[in-house]
Image (cartoon, rainbow, N blue to C red):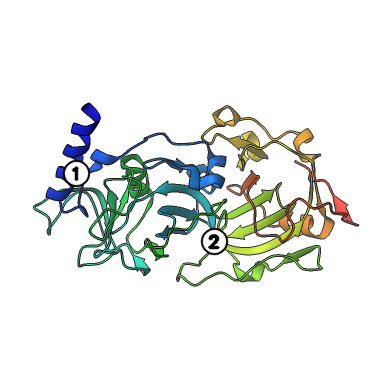
């Protein structure tokens, strides 16, 4: 009886608010998940999200809204740092697709179209009423065109975006699509154009630092693909085959810092599900589990500066045959 009454109240509230501007009454599950759960984003229940900004603390930000999967993914420096369930526009009020920029931000916005209904943490995409904001999340498209987000996720996203940030809306809410893995690397660039496949062919590694000469560096070590990808300022500048003898399924982040006396050292960063990592030094045993081509290692080492981040993950970086055995003729084990 309580559930039925609650459901009726939720529906009445949504109708009165015009649905696009409904508040967080239908937020559903509120838990944030461990970082590696982003690999299985289709298993998130309505209202759930994954939030791990430590994975890429700096770099250009991009929000990718997939209407077909009813998911929003946030990329920073070209790497996924967050994923959330959404609710987009229902039939007759479909959320428009395209490349948008954030035009306005208002944490306590009231709707101009729907009787001043609350639209918490509103980030406007169009001047005629389409925005990202906290709202109802019943597990299917229900709004009048806005993209509803969980309250906690919406608040966290609001804090890290700036006016002019890129938001790409793609897919078709009327044609649901399921996939087993949310993409780790951004599938589009800051203009909304699709990124071409970056996988290696016959070569052991590729190094093109001129594609992005400056900016924050993120190194992705994919145990699933036995590969390493280097991104700078959101652009892939290097990719290599590797031998990674580590079956730990967890996601770990390691940051290059400056210690006492100016000495550089690698320290683990705590991410959701692995908070105990925080502050632990990178040890030689972990390094001994990774081997890569000597030329690639020397090239990457020459670009390292404090603030560089290593992401160790089971997610794919787009190589053709994940996990296949490799022999690297001239390889080297990294040193601290």
Horizontal side of residue 242 vs 128, given as left or right: right
Horizontal side of residue 251 vs 301, given as left or right: left
Residue 293: image quadrant is bottom right
Secondary structure of the residue carrying tag 2 is: loop
Viewer-nearest residue: 203 or 208: 203
The x, y position of residue 117, in whole percent, is 14, 49
Viewer-nearest residue: 287 or 10: 10
Q: Crowding near pointer 2: few (<14 within 10 Å), some, many (20+)?
A: many
Above-or-below relation of 106 to 273: below
Q: Crowding near pointer 1: few (<14 within 10 Å), some, many (20+)?
A: some
Which residue bears the numbered disc 1? Answer: 11
Viewer-nearest residue: 200 or 7: 7
Taking the spot 53% from the left edge, 63% from the top edge, the residue there is 187
The x, y position of residue 322, in whole percent, is 73, 54
Number of disc labels: 2
Lower sequence index among marks 2 and 1: 1
Horizontal side of residue 104 vs 168, given as left or right: left
Distance from Cα at disc 2 to Cα at disc 1: 42 Å
Above-or-below relation of 288 to 307: above
Q: Nearer the viewer, mark 2 or mark 1?
A: 1
Secondary structure of the residue carrying tag 1 is: helix
Which residue bears the numbered disc 2? Answer: 234
Taking the spot 66% from the left edge, 67% from the top edge, the residue there is 198
**Farthest-out residue, right:** 329
Above-or-below relation of 48 to 89: above
Viewer-nearest residue: 89 or 128: 89
Horizontal side of residue 100 vs 324, given as left or right: left
Taking the spot 41% from the left edge, 40% from the top edge, the residue there is 48
Taking the spot 33% from the left edge, 52% from the top edge, the residue there is 87
The x, y position of residue 147, in whole percent, is 31, 55
Q: Quadrant of the C terminus?
A: top right
Q: Are marks 2 and 1 in contact (CB under 8 Å)?
A: no
């Amino acid at each position: 009886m309580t559930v039925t009454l609650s459901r009726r109240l939720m529906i009445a509230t949504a109708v009165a608010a015009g649905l696009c501007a409904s508040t967080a009454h239908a937020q559903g599950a509120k838990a944030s998940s461990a970082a590696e759960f982003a690999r299985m984003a289709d298993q998130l229940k309505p209202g759930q999200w994954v939030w791990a900004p430590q994975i890429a603390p700096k770099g250009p930000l991009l929000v990718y809204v997939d209407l077909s999967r009813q998911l929003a993914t946030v990329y920073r420096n070209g790497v996924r740092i967050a994923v959330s369930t959404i609710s987009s526009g229902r039939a007759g009020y479909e959320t428009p697709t395209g490349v948008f920029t954030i035009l306005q931000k208002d944490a306590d916005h009231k709707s101009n179209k729907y009787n001043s209904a609350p639209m918490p943490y509103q980030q406007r995409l169009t001047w005629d009423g389409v925005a990202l904001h906290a709202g109802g999340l019943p597990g299917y498209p229900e709004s009048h065109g806005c993209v509803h987000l969980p309250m906690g996720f919406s608040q966290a996203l609001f804090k890290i975006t700036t006016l002019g940030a890129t938001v790409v809306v793609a897919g078709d809410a009327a044609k649901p699509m399921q996939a087993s893995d949310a993409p780790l690397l951004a599938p589009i660039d800051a203009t909304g154009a699709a990124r071409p496949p970056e996988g290696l062919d016959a070569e052991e590694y590729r190094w093109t630092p001129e594609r992005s000469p400056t900016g924050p560096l993120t190194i992705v070590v994919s145990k699933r693909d036995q590969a390493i990808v280097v991104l700078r300022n959101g652009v892939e500048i290097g990719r290599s085959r590797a031998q990674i003898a580590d079956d730990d399924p967890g996601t770990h982040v390691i940051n290059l810092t400056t210690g006492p006396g100016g000495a550089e050292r690698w320290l683990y960063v705590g991410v959701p599900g692995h908070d105990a990592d925080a502050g632990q030094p990178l040890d030689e045993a972990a390094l001994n589990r990774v081997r890569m081509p000597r030329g690639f290692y020397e090239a990457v080492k020459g670009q390292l500066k404090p603030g560089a981040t290593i992401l160790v993950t089971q997610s794919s970086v787009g190589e053709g045959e994940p996990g296949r055995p490799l022999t690297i003729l001239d390889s080297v084990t990294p040193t601290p």
